[in-house]
Amino acid sequence: MKLTIGHLYPDLLNLYGDRGNIQCFRKRLEWRGMEAEVIPFLSGDTIDFSQLDIILLGGGSDREQELVCGHLKSIQQDFKNYVEDGGVVLAVCGGYQLLGKYYKTDKKMIEGLSILDITTEWQPERLIRNIVLDSPLFDTPVVGFENHGGRTYIGSHTPFGKVFYGLGNTGKSGYEGVLYKNVIGTYLHGPLLPKNPQVCDYLLERALKRKYGDNIVLEPLKDELEHLANGYIAGRYSDKKYILKETIKRHI
Amino acid sequence: MKLRSVLAIKCAKCTSYLIKKLNRGSGVTLPGYVARLVDPHILSVMVGMVKEKTIVTMGTNGKTTTNSILYHALEAEGKKVIINRTGANMLNGIISAFVLAADKHCRLDADYACIEVDEIASVNVLPQLKPDCALLTNISRDQLDRFGEVDITFNKLKTAVTSVPDTKLIINCDDVLSYTLASESGNTFVTYGISEQIFDDISRSEIRESIFCRSCEKKLEYDFFHYGQLGIYHCPNCGLKRPEPDFTAADISLEDELYTFSMDGMLIHSTARTPYNIYNTLSAYAALNALEADLAHFQDMIESFDYGNNRESIFSINSARVQLHLAKNPIGFQQKISLVLKDEKPKDIIIQINDTYQDGEDISWLWDVDFQYLADAEAATITTAGTRKFDMGLRLKYEDISCDNTTDLRSTIIERTKRGTGNLYVIVNYSGLYSTNYMLTELEKTQKGGEEA
């Protein structure tokens, strides 16, 4: 079995260790005896969505997002069809914002893919810190790091998780990210997948089922180190004393 | 001098005295804070007492080394120079450097000031310092949890230099970000750059900041990359291109682990073991020229210069060779990996990654480093340590490189020096540097002969 992973615009969107997400997809397939092919699509390349099983859209700076925006127009319809057809997408930070209708910065209006009915607005205070989520999809918490100036309003969409510690979509809503069909949009980097193998396997399984049929089940892997890394952050932010200490430090 | 400034200096000196007496750290920032509380204009007052010139050094990598070269070059010409301590490169640390250098009559006896300035702090510091020259080493991603995005760093630096239009810039024209910044700023500038390919494949980090033309947004074309986005570039659309540098190093060759190169008519047998120290030397030399400083002793000084700076120290513990290296961002770490691979002997490696505010709380940058090369590093063991040892371990695991981890760095070091390959690399990020350096110094003293368990 083999999955083809399309990495969209790594020349523009490569800000927060997104390579880690690609590497995680690849290795967790290989360790199970499956094949992974990663195709990087640079800005301007043509993309055949029918050959893709997973798409990764990473984070970029506001300026680079604006440059991406021009390329998105040409793939908008194909991308939308792919999503509606159950195609797997992981969109992080800037990529997450671009799935929506627009990203309004202080100077400009960046048009998005309009695949989801969500909008993002820029505010001068960036939301930067470690973040821990409880997601209904998983038993273990999802941990990562958020760093965004945009506040994303997801309307009636389902969020990716509930914020246990951190700020999330708007800093106020108590929720983070978005879930739609087989799409996960999120502000969590760090990168997201290596520390959250449950999320990686969830996406891999969805992609395998779409390609090879519903009876595909992923063999569990020995994820000791993954759980230690995840547990370290989850544990740290379950400790009220630690949170208090960090909050005090942040304000002096 | 106004009474207020005198009072500010006295208060700062008292604070410094108290901190040392009470053993509350080295006291490099609080005195500056106190001085500023008493006299908000203290920095301008102090810098006004510098007899000749003031230069600031900014940029992501190479600040401390470059500033240290400037300091030693000026001292070699018999000048009295004020310099701020490593890491004390925010406003308070810089004020401390000045006020603590004042004599008991609150006067400053200095010909030059060489000040390293943090990129974010530059916006506040430069208008007060009004330096004669500002050296910018390079701009790349570093501590994104503090800086947000590289574009934000770029804009801060640009705001800082445009606020001091009379300051002459010294910039690395191989870095399209630095060059664009200088061109857009309106300040006069001189450039330095290297036209030979001196970085090997391993040190050539593929993580690049913005290789899209900032004026016309087309993708730049490169003859070759040095590392990151540094290289010989041109824009196929609007004609922007890497200029011929005013200062350059050429005929670069590596002999017995040390670089030799020619620069402005001198053939320099340097003590530099890494190509980025050629950049640091070149940038400092360009800056000294811009300052119109004497250079009679430059060659002698640089040929015996210690680039280590406590950042690359070598120890002998239990007859093992132990090297301590600082790696705090992707570009820097990539250079260290290249250095490790140049050493063909078997080795043990310890990597300590912390995530304090000083280090950067976001450790996702580890995934921007090409760690896969470590698979060929002849490493008998790789051990991860620090608050984020599991994240570092995962980074290696996802390259199929096996490693273990430790919560007790000291005993792991002792164990490796006794039963390891006799060739140990300890790579740490910022907050672990001083404590590990201290630990290794102390181990070197007490462990001779291996009498301690």
Image: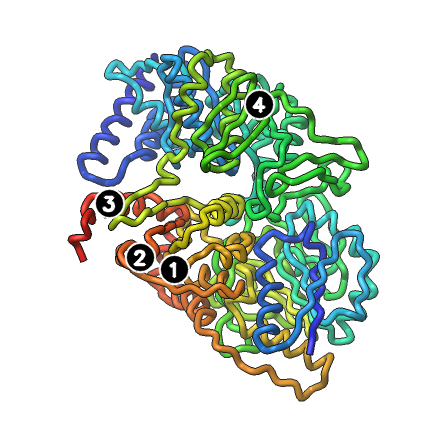
- The residue beneath circle 4 is B169
Q: Is residue B354 above or below residue B295?
A: below
Q: Is residue A33 above or below residue B235?
A: below
Task: Give the image quarter of residue B453.
Answer: bottom left
Instruction: Please state, as top left, top right, bottom left or bottom right, where the N terminus of chain A lies in the image.
Output: bottom right
Amino acid at dot 1: Thr
Q: CA distance from mark 2 to mark 3?
A: 14 Å
* Disc 2 crowd, CA 10 A, few/some/many (<14, 14-19, 20+): many
* Disc 4 crowd, CA 10 A, few/some/many (<14, 14-19, 20+): many
The location of residue B268, given as percent across then percent down, is 49, 23
Q: Nearer the viewer, mark 4 or mark 1?
A: 1
- Circle on res. B444: 3
Both marks 4 and 1 on one chain: yes
Q: Residue furthest bottom?
A: A215
Both marks 3 and 1 on one chain: yes
Amino acid at dot 2: Arg
Which residue is drawn at the image coordinates 75% and 65% (left, top)? A115
Both marks 2 and 3 on one chain: yes
